Image (cartoon, rainbow, N blue to C red):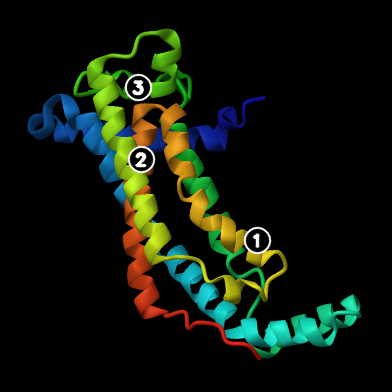
Amino acid sequence: MDPLSFPPIAAILDAAYELLMGLAALLQPVAGAASAALAVILLTLLVRTILIPTGIAQARAEQTRARLAPRLRALQRRYRNDRERMSRETMKLYADEKASPLAGCAPVLVQAPIVGVVYALFLYPVIAGHPNALLSEQLFGVPLGASLAGSIVSGTVTAPAALVFGVILVLIVLVAEVTRRLLRPDVAASEGVPGGEAVARMAGFLQFGTAVVALFAPLAAALYLLVTVSWTLVQRLVLRRRFPVEPATSA
């Protein structure tokens, strides 16, 4: 059974669809044929604005992890031969600091259903029983439902499609590189979290995974991804100044 056909989810998805197409209709006199693409961008900005509190929560969790990392490493060294004692002491440290080792997970869980509903608008040809007209709209002659990989495989790729997707992919890669350089994960701070060091080392390279997704995603979804990674970069830079992560030092 398709989970999106479940009545409550279908109703939410249909409401999001009506909002998106309503925005496109309002923008039609100004943006013309690009109104639907512009509506996708505006809807993405609206969603990211709604999710600002989750970004703040993640920044606070990152700051807490960095602050506690030296003490966590000390506990790991002290009780390296007693895993049960190390686990108890670790949880006690978090409790004493009124923090949680899973604090960064909750914001992600909150974002997931919201982002999932929005992303479904760009993937499904049928929304709540009616055709998804968004996918037939165009940007510079390229349907919003077309993907670069799909067009290449089918042999239907056009010069405008290659240009539009090429620009989007290049911009996503540039944002990923700036993110990697300016927000390089603190490997030392991540050592206090089980498996955190490996995750921190991989995180920088995973930034480029969005470009791979955009290669296979419909144009509407690629626009969504470009706006999302750009917003996330700016938001993280602002929040890093508000919640600075001090370099971890050995305890």
Q: Which residue is label 2 attached to? A: 224
Q: Position of residue 138 (x, y in %)?
A: 24, 22
Q: Nearer the viewer, residue 86 or 30?
A: 86
| Mark pair 2, 1: CA separation | 29 Å
Rendered image: mark on residue 135: 3
Q: Nearer the viewer, mark 1 or mark 3?
A: 1
Q: Which residue is label 1 attached to? A: 198
| Mark pair 1, 3: CA separation | 39 Å
Three-letter amino acid code at the position of disc 2: Tyr
Q: Characterize the local packing of mark 2: few (<14), some (14-19) or many (20 or more) Cα atoms within 10 angstroms.
A: many
Quadrant in which the N terminus appears = top right
When the figure is inspected, residue 90 is found, relative to residue 239, above or below; the finding is below
- Give left or right: position of 228 versus 42: right
**Secondary structure of residue under mark 3:** helix
Q: Is residue 47 visible?
A: no
Q: Which of the 4 image quadrants contains residue 197? A: bottom right
Q: Which of the 4 image quadrants contains residue 90? A: bottom right
Say which label, 2 or 1, has the lower sequence index: 1
Say which label, 1 or 3, has the lower sequence index: 3
Q: Nearer the viewer, mark 2 or mark 1?
A: 1
Q: Characterize the local packing of mark 3: few (<14), some (14-19) or many (20 or more) Cα atoms within 10 angstroms.
A: many
- How many dots with numbers? 3
Q: Residue furthest top?
A: 155
Q: Position of residue 9 (x, y in %)?
A: 54, 37
Three-letter amino acid code at the position of disc 3: Leu
Q: Nearer the viewer, mark 3 or mark 2?
A: 2
When the figure is inspected, residue 102 is found, relative to residue 179, above or below; the finding is below
Three-letter amino acid code at the position of disc 1: Ala
When the figure is inspected, residue 214 is found, relative to residue 83, above or below; the finding is above
| Mark pair 3, 2: CA separation | 14 Å
